[in-house]
Image (tube, rainbow, N blue to C red):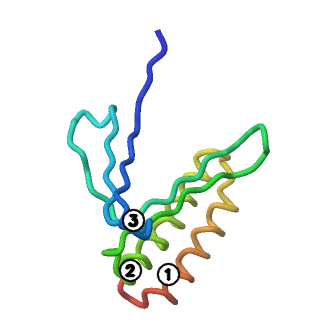
Amino acid sequence: MEKKSKINFTVSLDENHVPEKIEWSATDTGEEEIKDAKAMIISLWDAKENNTLRIDLWTKEMMLDEMKHFFYQSIITMSDTYERATNDKAIAEEMREFGKNIGEKMLGNNK
């Protein structure tokens, strides 16, 4: 039998369609708890179109400093994912260096 997992996102919008609240849950977390998030970046590969589809959302409560940390951490974790997926250590390290450099410019010493 094929194992399946579900990830659910619920986005509450204001009257101008701006996200006010992002909630998520996943069947494989071992918990049935719905968790809150202030931002999300989802990338999906469309093999038919040979293109990346994206969903980028953040709530009104997402502070500028939080957004900077979110992007910095996303770049670093994308480097790790790239290395695991391709085993290309050299490019992954270049991506990490880019992330560190841009992180210093965005965050200073507050990483």
Determine the residue positioned at 44% across, 23% down: 4
Q: CA distance from mark 1 to mark 3?
A: 26 Å
**Residue type of the residue flagged with mark 1:** Gly
Query: Residue 28: which quarter of the image?
Result: top left
Q: Position of residue 25 (x, y in %)?
A: 31, 42
Q: Where is residue 98 shown, x and y percent of the image?
A: 61, 76
Label for residue 66?
Answer: none
Circle 1 residue: 103
How packed is label 2: few (under 14 Cα within 10 Å), some, or many (20 or more)?
few
69 to the left or right of 104? left
Q: How many marks?
A: 3
Q: Residues within 10 Å of mark 1 (few under 14, many from 20)?
A: many
Which element type, helix, strand or loop, lies under badge 1?
helix
Residue 111: mark in rendering = 2
Q: Which quadrant, please, contains the C terminus?
A: bottom left
Disc number at residue 19? 3
**Front one among 61 and 31:** 61
Q: Answer with mark 1 or mark 2, whichever residue precedes in sequence.
A: 1
Mark 2 or mark 3, which is nearer the start of the sequence? 3
Q: Are marks 1 and 2 in contact (CB under 8 Å)?
A: yes
| Kind of residue indicated by mark 3 | Pro
* Numbered disc 3: secondary structure: strand
Q: Kindly check if marks 1 and 3 are in contact, taking CB atoms under 8 A apart as contact.
A: no
Report which quarter residue 64 is drawn in: bottom left
Q: CA distance from mark 1 to mark 2?
A: 7 Å
Marks 3 & 2, CB-CB < 8 Å contact: no
Mark 2 lies on a secondary structure that is loop
Residue type at mark 2 is: Lys
